[in-house]
Image: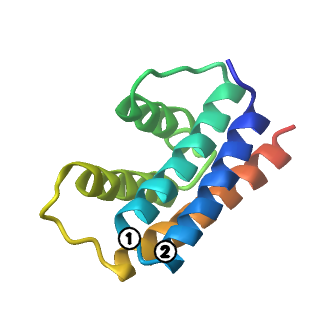
Amino acid sequence: MSDASQFLDLAEEELVASQLLLQNTYYRACISRAYYAMYYATQALLTTRDIESRTHKGVLQQFSQSFVQSGDLPVSMAQNLKRTYGLRQLGDYEADVVLTEELATQALEAAVEFVEQVRRYLGNSD
């Protein structure tokens, strides 16, 4: 299993990719990379508690159960993660859905905040 810092490095890489994709008007791909930044940050958290999940839905559920329901992290983080996951699903699997610049910008902003909150939490939990 990877450690938290490796997952956080992946999250940062995805944030950079998402920003570049937004700047070049690839909104679907921007949203996908924003989601993956959040996904990797979530994996960093789960790793600190030796929690593994093999599915994206499982990762979302474990995050909510282990970090949000416990009060360690705010509900808004789970809501943003779930929303961005849903947008990523639409973008990746529904060719007729239009994902706008506004949605891509919102997804990227949510991902940046999410990763920052994870970093703060992990920095305070050492």
Tell me the residue at 65%/56% (across/down).
115
Is 101 above or below relative to 66?
below
Residue 92: percent from left, percent from top: 28, 51
Residue 49: percent from left, percent from top: 67, 24
Question: For the residue marked with disc 1, what is the amino acid?
Answer: Tyr
Residue 9: percent from left, percent from top: 74, 45
Q: Foreground: 9 or 60?
A: 9
Tell me the residue at 47%/30% (across/down).
62
- The disc label shown at residue 22, or none: 2
The residue that mark 1 highlights is 27
Is 118 above or below relative to 29?
above
Tell me the SS state at disc 1: helix
Residue lying at the far right of the rendered structure = 126
Position of 35 with respect to 7 (left or right) is left
Residue lying at the far front of the rendered structure = 24
When asked about the image quadrant of residue 107, the answer is bottom left
Question: For the residue marked with disc 2, what is the amino acid?
Answer: Leu
Q: Is residue 112 visible?
A: yes
When asked about the image quadrant of residue 90, the answer is bottom left
Q: Quadrant of the C terminus?
A: top right
Q: Is residue 75 visible?
A: no
Tell me whether the residue at label 2 lies in contact with that at label 1, contact meaning CB atoms closer than 8 angstroms: yes
Judge the density around disc 1: few (<14), some (14-19), many (≥20) Cα neighbours within 10 Å: many
Among numbered discs 2 and 1, the one appearing first in the sequence: 2
Is 55 above or below relative to 8?
above
